[in-house]
Image: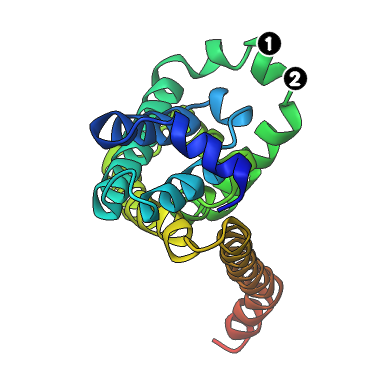
Amino acid sequence: MEQWLQDIFNLLPGGIIFVAAVFAITFLEALVGIGLIMPGSVLTVFCGWLAFHGKAPIATIMAAAALGALLGDLLSYWLGARFGNHLWRLSLLKKRQGLLHLAELFFFEHGGKSIFFGRFLGPIRGLVPFVAGASHMRPVVFSCYAVISGILWGISYPGLGYLGGTSWQHAETLAGRLGLLVALALIVMLLVAWLRHKFLPRQDVHNAKHK
């Protein structure tokens, strides 16, 4: 282990305090506004890496990460539904209107799928649930997507750190590859949606003429 990592490892507490810290990290980074300035994904992968070296059981870390992610998403959704118009005016969000606009477009274009993919897209992770709440997405539908994405995220990111436990650089590489796979899946989804919008209307018109 590199010396600087060894120093950090020795300073950090283990056991229940470490698990609580994992929960707090994943919960806070899912909140609208806070998630814009908090590198939650990197920290969560790092927590998985620390679990490999004995700070806490990896299964416990995964459960804490998934629970924090889910509750953070639910709170962001509730804040959007209850205070969306007021929070929109906060200076922290005003400075990032471009990201907010991107989150809005992403949500309105893809609906529930945006909740799932948004969890794996760092810059808009905390914004999509907020936009969903402000747009009055049905709570049951939102919750279903949030539960699925939160569990998968809570397993995958600490798991990547754990799998790369022999080397922090290896863990970073694995996390980068996961991000690339998610990006490719999103590109395919966007391409399919574009093709559907481009060609299906013509097909509908063609069918209507022959009825």
Is disc 1 in contact with disc 2, using a CB cutoff of under 8 Å? yes
**Nearest the eye: 164 or 195:** 164
Scheme of colours in the image: rainbow
Q: Is residue 83 above or below residue 53?
A: above
Q: Position of residue 130 (x, y in %)?
A: 49, 30
**Nearest the eye: 206 or 193:** 193
Q: Residue at x 46, y 24 (%)?
A: 80
Q: Which residue is mark 1?
A: 91
Mark 1: amino acid: Ser
Q: Residue at x 35, y 57 (%)?
A: 155
Secondary structure, mark 2, is loop
Q: Position of residue 129 (x, y in %)?
A: 46, 36
The circle on residue 95 is 2
Q: Residue at x 53, y 48 (%)?
A: 118
Answer whether residue 81 is visible to the viewer in this image: yes
**Nearest the eye: 195 or 54:** 54
